[in-house]
Image (cartoon, coloured by chain):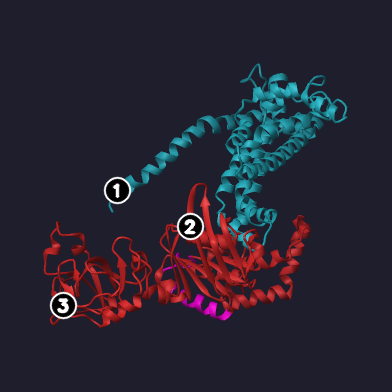
Amino acid sequence: MSTMVKVRRRIPPYLFVGAAAVYLAIFTATPLLRGVWLSFTDTKLLNPDGGTFVGADNYRNLLTEDRFLSSVVTTLLYTTLTVVGALVLGTAAAFAINERFRGRAVARAVLTMPWAAPSIAVVLVYTWIFNVEDGVANRSLAALGIGQQGWLLDPDRGLLAVTLVSVWKVFPFIMLVVLAALQSVPSELRESGRIDGAARLTIVREIVLPHIAPTLRVAALLMTIWSIRRFEIIFLLTGGGPVDSTNTLVINVYREAFQNSELGRAAAIGMLGLCLSLVVTVVYFVVDGRSARKEAS
Amino acid sequence: MPALTFSGLSKSYGDTRVIEEFTAEIPDREFLVLLGPSGCGKSTMLRMIAGLVDITSGDLLFDGKRVNDLEPKERNVAFVFQSYALYPHKTVRANIAFPLLMSRFRWWQHIPVLGWFARRRAMRDPAISNRIAEIAETMELTPYLDRRPRTLSGGQRQRVALARALVREPAVYLLDEPLSNLDAKLRAQMRTEITALYRRVGVSFVYVTHDQVEAMTMGTRVILLQDGVVQQHGTPEEIYDRPANTFVARFIGSPAMNLFPVTVTGQRIVLADGQGLPAVPASVPDDTRVSLGVRAERIAVSRDGPGLAARVVVVERLGGESVVGLRLGAGIQDDANAPAELRDLFYAKVPGRVDLEVDDACRVQVNLTGCSWFDATTGRRLEPAARIEEVSAA
């Protein structure tokens, strides 16, 4: 094979990768690097190019502030509750609509709606549902003999309300992903389980869940990253309140950047949030790699 | 160790009938083969026996006891799937142990930590661990016990599937085309192993296949299906020697039974090209068109001598024997306008190596002993065959 032919054959892969690399460089790497730089400056919103280098001051200050540490805890709590809630509800819904029953197509469409609905519409509906006086939530609780709850006004209820709305909004994603995984489980495996004497629940636990576990792990990873980054539902519902009870890292970034005009501090919070996402991703790949090695051994 | 009784059994999906009503009694400890082409309903029938598919009408009895409404686990059957259906995330040991663990399963084992401890404890129980070791030894799987199925070859996976079926000592073994994913050599080896296994365990086997060689070599009883209809039920010898219709005649045997369209006239059987055979089936009225079925091994071919004129079209030399594909007559059969029956090949199976080449003219002698006669319109076997044989032999 001549050298020219060899060179010509090597070019196409670089062209394909190059297009994606240019896109990432413009729309991801540049803002990221700019963010890193900003996090080491005292840049203000009204003078975005006039910041001076302050070293690690922003990070040092943040890591000693109770408000920031509290927002990290809120983020972790919100993420955990949302991911667990969405995984449980989504998986249960996937199992339900994987069964054959009358009206299954309608059920699938209805259950997918929250994912398809715009966040602003969802938040508006839930603002009414959580209305203290006339909301469906409080009226339902009243019917059960439970007193009024200040869903979006009480600091003890804010995170719960935001989590409930988030779970409702995102569980269809898990449902669809798990449904696709369930449909890939060979029917013969379930039948074999029945022959071997396993009950329905045992078949699910012993045969089906291990089969869809890789899918669940990927879905959990995506859901975790998205939850850490989620802004619109929380901001539109509570704006980070009441009394900072839903002040997650992303809300904190917004507040610092656009309410307090502290672009440098906001960038530093963003960087710490990115680190949190990276930790989750690394943990996922370690766990996934370990189970892949175990499988292959 | 039950005898199986199919009493008016049928299966429909909505308005589509996939198994027509049929009745059969299978004695205990038989190796029953459900045989037929793809889509004939044999796997559905096997799944009905296993309880994986509901029975639409009729009764299925194990030792006289109706089992229609029993769950698969309550029927005490073992099932070997075509794809083996091994649990991919479990080791070979855990796959084999699974039916034993399930027989000891209690509801509280759903609680994660308790369940994990209970399983570990059960796996250490000598009753289970010794049984697994014994089965693994029998199936030559001992070195692979801690491996996962995807790291095994097709033959090894097949053995694991059989080991999982064996471990529980079921009353009936149900095998759904278990050899279809193996290459020819391994298939022949596993055929022998399954037959040896059947002899050793001494319980009923029901085996689904589309391969008539498997049916003939392994089965003690065969049910042959086509389009959901049982065509014939009997021993392999009965089905081979006395096919119930032309479908059975064509399906069983390699090469298939030769079917000659003939007319019975006077004291002669006249073939499509006008040549005649000096014999008449007693039960067939004069001037009737029938199909004469003759197995390939009952046709002798020679370069010269007495017999029907024919021409060699194909010669397959198999080593110990040869199969010769022939056309009747002297040459008009090559004409595209010639009747289909003259263009059809018929086959002779002769021992050793045949001294004939393609296009050679030859002579064919048909031994009518044990031949079959079929109605030309319905394809059904004409009886009584015994009488036909006597007359033909004469």
| Quadrant of the rendering where the N terminus of chain A is positioned | bottom left
Q: Secondary structure at mark 3?
A: strand
Tell me the number on the disc at residue B20.
Answer: 2
Chain of the residue under label 1: A
Measure the alpha-carbon separation of dots 2 and 1.
Answer: 65 Å
Task: Please say whether residue A91 is one of the residues in the magenta stretch.
Answer: no
Horizontal side of B30 relative to A128 (left or right) equals: left
Asked if marks 2 and 1 fall on the same chain, the answer is no
Q: Quadrant of residue A38?
A: top right
Q: Which residue is mark 1?
A: A5
Helix or strand or loop: what does disc 2 sit on? strand
Q: Is residue B200 or residue B162 the one in the foreground?
A: B200
- In which quadrant of the rendered image does the C terminus of chain A lie? bottom right
Residue B60 position in % (x across, y down)? 59, 63
The colour with which the image depicts chain A is cyan
User: Can residue B17 be seen from the camera position used here?
Assistant: yes
Which amino acid type corresponds to the residue marked 3 in the rendered image?
Answer: Arg
Position above or below: B357 against A102: below
SS at badge 1: helix
Q: Is residue B155 left or right of residue B289?
A: right
Under mark 1, the amino acid is: Val
Where residue A133 appears, as percent x and y from the top left, is 82, 19
Percent across and percent down for residue B28 are 57, 75
